[in-house]
């Protein structure tokens, strides 16, 4: 479904206890919420929830997927601003469809 296409985006800021992990604009974010996987799109209702360790996926405006391995923490979403605060987080993989294994 292409409703709204890329007009409405959200600002995402992923921070670990000792360093920033990633920030930028996104079309969607999938988080490992304590009650199960949760997807967040722009204009989502405000939410504050605990997350558990697992994979967090950000889809940027170009459709590129950024996957991060995160530990326990929380997310806060309001007014198209998503903050993810975790004890530890690291960039695992980026896929754009054009990526190929290059040595």
Image (cartoon, grey):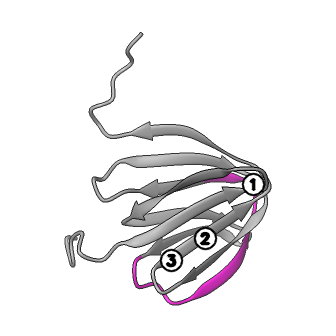
Q: CA distance from mark 1 to mark 3?
A: 21 Å
User: What secondary structure is found at the residue carrying circle 3?
Assistant: strand
**Which circle's residue, 1 or 3, is located before the other in the chain?**
1
Q: CA distance from mark 2 to mark 3?
A: 7 Å
Left or right: 1 as drawn, with respect to 65: left
Q: Position of residue 14 (x, y in %)?
A: 61, 59
User: What secondary structure is found at the residue carrying circle 1?
Assistant: loop
96 and 83: which is toward the camera:
83
State which quadrant residue 46 falls in: bottom right
Q: Residue at x 30, y 59 (%)?
A: 61
Q: Residue at x 45, y 70 (%)?
A: 11
Disc 2: CA contacts within 10 A as few (<14), some (14-19) or many (>=20):
some
Left or right: 93 as drawn, with respect to 85: left
Q: Which mark is residue 83?
A: 2
Q: Which mark is residue 63?
A: none
Q: Nearer the viewer, mark 1 or mark 2?
A: 2
Q: CA distance from mark 1 to mark 2?
A: 16 Å
Q: Report the span colored magenta.
A: 42-55
Quarter of the image for the C terminus: give it: top left
Left or right: 56 as drawn, with respect to 34: left
- Look at mark 3 in the image and give the residue it sits on: 81
Quarter of the image for the N terminus: give it: bottom left
Q: Which mark is residue 53?
A: 1
Q: Position of residue 27 (x, y in %)?
A: 36, 66
User: Does residue 35 lie above or below 13 as drawn?
Assistant: below
2 and 89: which is toward the camera:
89
**Which circle's residue, 1 or 2, is located before the other in the chain?**
1
User: Does residue 20 lie above or below 43 as drawn?
Assistant: above
Left or right: 36 as drawn, with respect to 57: right
Q: Magenta segment: does it hold 54? A: yes
């Amino acid at each position: 479904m292409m409703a709204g296409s890329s007009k409405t985006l959200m600002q995402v800021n992923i921070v670990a206890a000792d360093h920033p992990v990633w920030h930028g604009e996104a079309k969607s974010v999938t988080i490992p919420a304590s009650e199960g996987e949760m997807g967040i799109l722009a204009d989502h209702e405000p939410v504050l929830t605990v997350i558990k360790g697992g994979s967090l996926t950000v889809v940027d405006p170009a459709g590129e997927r950024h996957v991060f391995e995160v530990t326990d923490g929380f997310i806060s979403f309001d007014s198209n601003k998503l903050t993810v605060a975790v004890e530890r987080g690291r960039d695992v993989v980026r896929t754009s469809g054009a990526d190929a294994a290059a040595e």
